Amino acid sequence: MELEGYSDEPTCSFSLGLVSEPQIVPEEHPTRTPAPNDEDFGPEDLMDSNPETPPKRRRLLPSEKAGPKWEDLNKDCLVNVVTRLGTKSLLIVIPFVCKSWYRVSLDPSCWQTINFQEIKYGHQSWYHFSSAYAFFKSIIKRSQGNATTVMLPTLCTEEVLRYLANECPALKALYFPPAIWDNSSFVLPKLIRKWKNLELLKLGNSINMVKILEGISLHCKNFCQLDIDSTAYIGRRAAAAIPTLLPNIKYLNLRQANISRTSLKRILRGCKKLVHLDVRDSVGFECDDKLLKLGSHISNFQIFKDDDAYIVGLIGEVEIYAGFEGNASET
């Protein structure tokens, strides 16, 4: 007698692994949401209360999947970024990006280099201030005495220079604009003593240059570079003062200057430590083998210009150098 549901066939079976076991795949519902990817979950979301059941994961929120935030960036790294963007960007761009960038823009480390020559005059720069001097002070204050390089604005008055000397004693490089119509060239020798770390000075003209070099010689022991803006006249006194007062100078830029042959020879003979001298496009002398030999100790001696021709004329006993008159005895 057979019982219903009973069979003589053995109930135990085994597989030799020759044929894969059939897999039961559930039908996918057309409206079912696909399973999320693993990267949507964090490891802390795994639930291991029952090891026999698959772990349950919590889907990450969009804010949790985002990368590092600007406010979490190391402050020194962010300062390094924004200081590369220039003074103009520090004033009118960076503070308006986000709160963290605004806070960093107030850090004194961002104002070690201040370039007023990047800032154009007009309502965008000056309309919040009663004067250019007030604007200048507001920027210098941000450095809290840490500024090492300053490029002065065209409106560089005596008042501006005195404030800079008092507030920025750590200055190493000072750049004057090409044209200054004030007494800054005359007050500068009195202020040089406050910049004992000064290494580079760019003058907008050669007015009162000997007095300025005397101040540098007395107070700036690390000074090594002098730039004179184009069209400057380097007379006999100035040419003699450079090797006398700055015997250790390494970099000298007199491009487009008005300098006689005698004055140039004095500089070449006296400045034995020069590694860079630029007198391209200058007038007052003709380049020849003698000058090249005198400057042979200078590794970067730039004397030629594009057409290699200097305009030198002679009328009676007066030599004419591209519109400048000088005594023939100077050559």
Image (cartoon, helix red, strand yellow):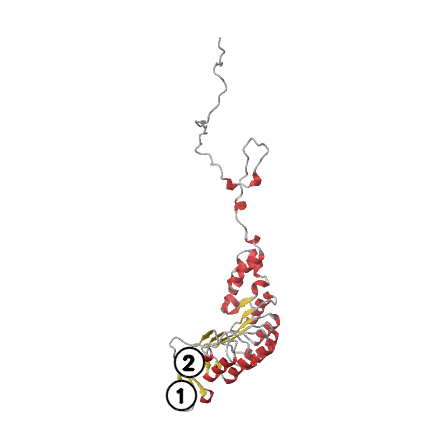
Q: Which amino acid does label 1 sit on?
A: Leu
Q: Is residue 7 above or below residue 185?
A: above
| Residue 59 position within the rendered picture, expressed as x and y whole percent measured from the top left | 53, 40
Tell me what residue is drawn at x 56 percent, y 63 percent.
110
Q: State how far apart marks 2 and 1 are (Cα).
A: 22 Å
Residue at numbered disc 2 = 289
Outermost residue toward the top in this view: 1
Q: In this view, does 269 lie above or below 142?
A: below
**Residue 314 disc label:** 1
| Residue 294 position within the rendered picture, expressed as x and y whole percent measured from the top left | 47, 80
Q: Assign the C terminus to one quadrant of the image.
A: bottom left
Task: Locate residue 47 relative to residue 268 in the image: left or right.
Answer: right
Q: What element carries label 2?
A: helix
Q: Is residue 73 above or below residue 140?
A: above
| Residue 150 in sight here | yes
Closest to the observer: 325 or 63?
Answer: 325
Q: Quadrant of residue 58?
A: top right
Q: Quadrant of residue 135?
A: bottom right
Tell me what residue is drawn at x 54 percent, y 45 percent.
64
Local crowd at mark 1 within 10 Å, few (<14), some, or many (≥20)?
few
CB within 8 Å, label 2 to label 1: no
Q: In this view, does 156 lie above or below 112?
A: below
Closest to the observer: 311 or 138?
Answer: 311
Q: What residue type is labelled 2?
A: Asp
Outermost residue toward the bottom in this view: 316
Tell me what residue is drawn at x 45 percent, y 83 percent.
261
Task: Locate residue 125 relative to residue 305 in the image: left or right.
Answer: right
